Image (cartoon, rainbow, N blue to C red):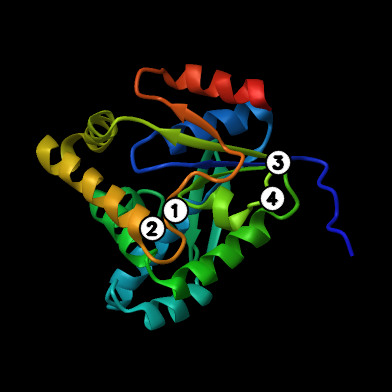
Amino acid sequence: MSAPVRTRPIVTIDGPAGSGKTTVSKRLAERAGLLRLDTGATYRACALAARRAGISWDDGPKLGTLCAGLDLAFRREGGELRVIMAGEDVSAAIRVPDMGMGASDVSRHPQVREALVALQRRMGADGGVVLEGRDTGTVVFPDAEVKFFLDAAAAVRARRRFLEWKSEAPPFEDVLRDVLRRDIQDSTRDHSPLRMAEGAVYIDSTTMTIDEVVDAMMEML
């Protein structure tokens, strides 16, 4: 039996840490009238839930069990997408620097990715969505109608993270070191490594504004 034809597209945006995926996906979803699903937030939520439950980010089996039962939802509020875990708004709690590395750590485990990919597929199966993360076009929805790979120079990505974290940011040198470490970890892990999906459009945002990136994506849509 052939798969049902989606009347609205699935759009995926993959790329390394700090490439601007979150900001770009928000604006693209607004302009295109699509729903944004932040897949990276699901891994951050897993890391937060594990920390609260006293589960090591290195313990794949326990993390997989935790994620399989994770009560997670996205909710629109005032134009923003809020992340709700077990009835609690954890949107701010998952965006602290430590949870970024936690997301990268837990995502190494196949048990975690299997549980969360299943969740992401259920949320976006009918189309009309923009997903951003590390493997949305390669693993979650390899049949997506439109795929992008958003990149930028490492120093530029680190500077964006440094400015985003404001008063909570560690020294810039530490942020750059963390970005480079995540690049290596994300691209060399055994399960679902970061790579450009087949048929994806590559966009280097190093010298581009957010609006220029979104304009380029809208041309494809």
Q: Mark 3 vs mark 2: give the one in front.
A: 3
Q: Which mark is residue 143?
A: 4
| Secondary-structure class at tag 2 | helix
Front position in the image: 72 or 19: 19
Front position in the image: 36 or 184: 184
Q: Amino acid at mark 3?
A: Glu
The location of residue 38, given as percent across then percent down, is 51, 48
Q: Mark 3 vs mark 1: give the one in front.
A: 3
| Secondary-structure class at tag 4 | loop
Q: Please rate how many residues cluster around mark 1, counting C-alpha atoms within 10 Å: few if below 14, some from 14 to 19, many from 20.
A: many
Q: State if disc 1 and disc 2 touch (CB < 8 Å).
A: yes
How far apart in space, not on screen, are marks 4 and 3 (Cα)?
6 Å
Q: Earlier in the sequence, mark 2 or mark 4?
A: 2
Q: Mark 2 vs mark 4: give the one in front.
A: 4
Residue in the image at 58% along x and 38% along y:
200
**What residue sits right under mark 3 in the picture?**
145
**What residue sits right under mark 2 in the picture?**
44
| Secondary-structure class at tag 3 | loop
Can you say whether 119 is above or below 196 in the image? below
Q: Is residue 169 left or right of residue 61?
A: left
The location of residue 11, given as percent across then percent down, is 63, 40
Q: Amino acid at mark 2?
A: Arg
Q: Amino acid at mark 4?
A: Asp
